[in-house]
Amino acid sequence: MEGEEYVMNAAEQVASKRNAGYRAAGAVEDGMVVGLGTGSTVFFAMERLGERMAREGLSIAGVPTSYQAAIRARRYGIGLTSLDEHPELDIAIDGADQVDPALRLIKGRGAALLREKCVCDAAKKVLIVVDPTKMVDTLNAPVPVEVLPFALAPVSRRLAALGADPVLREGVKKDGPIVTDNGNFILDCDFKAIADPGRLEAEMASIPGVLECGLFSAYGEKITVIVGEEKGCSVVSLQ
Ligand code: 5RP
């Protein structure tokens, strides 16, 4: 799985995501408050949670990490709550763009990284659902950074000084920059191979105007990664 790029066709990738999502949904217990991540793999977890609610009478509440997650959760009949009501969550289920062997992550392709990190931090246990293409030896994808529009220019300079070439994320079917669910911009920052994700995360967090970055380097101990495959799943944790 590691050391070389994992290639899948689209049908295999969908099957892998479905298997990962369904396995994660199977770990949710009655009465739990569940952080609901954003993206196509978490959709499958929500779909299965909806089925379990209808079939088994499973009763849960979800804290969505985005408008997308909230809309999808409602469609599956998952009742919503908030971090105000539940500052500690029993479990969170989320996707990732890259995962390294220490279970450090890059997230934020869907621009939901700020709320995703709040939910990850609040959860006792985090299930990361991915297909095998996400597993890498070294994190090297562009890191999304959520930036206060007021501070776009100085933050861009500071990120460039850290070695990135920040690119303002543009909308699709919308002219100009995308605006996150929190009203901010996203800078995609390509640092190439990231030798020390924890240090880079701390450096970015110290820049005024950076609301959050998509490096998740501090949660390996509570993360379980469910890697969906075409048939079945493998499970990775540090325990
Ligand atoms: C959104 C995210 C997603 O969880 C991540 O991009 C994975 O998405 P998908 O499951 O669609 O591959 O971080 O901000």
Image (cartoon, rainbow, N blue to C red):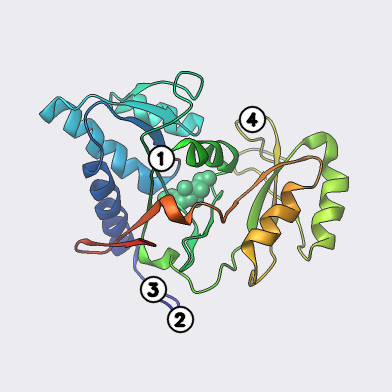
Image position of 145 with respect to 162: above or below: above
Write the residue at 78% across / 66% down.
Answer: 163
Marks 3, 4: nearer the viewer? 4
The residue identified by callout 3 is: 7
Could you tell which of marks 3 and 4 lies nearer the N-terminus? Answer: 3
Secondary structure type for disc 1: loop
Mark 2 and mark 1 lie on one chain; the one further toward the N terminus is: 2
Using the rendered view, name the quadrant where residue 48 is placed. top left
| Kind of residue indicated by mark 3 | Val
Quarter holding the N terminus is: bottom left
- Give the residue pinned by disc 4: 182
What amino acid type is highlighted by mark number 1?
Answer: Lys
Quote the CA–CA distance across marks 3 and 2: 12 Å
Q: Is residue 207 above or below residue 3?
A: above
Find numbered disc 4 in the image and state the secondary structure of the residue it sits on.
Answer: loop
Residue drawn where x is 75% and y is 55% of the image:
203
Cα–Cα gap, marks 2 and 1: 31 Å
CA gap between label 4 and label 2 equals 37 Å
Work out which residue is located at the far front of the displayed protein and give it.
239
- Left or right of 162: which side holds 44? left
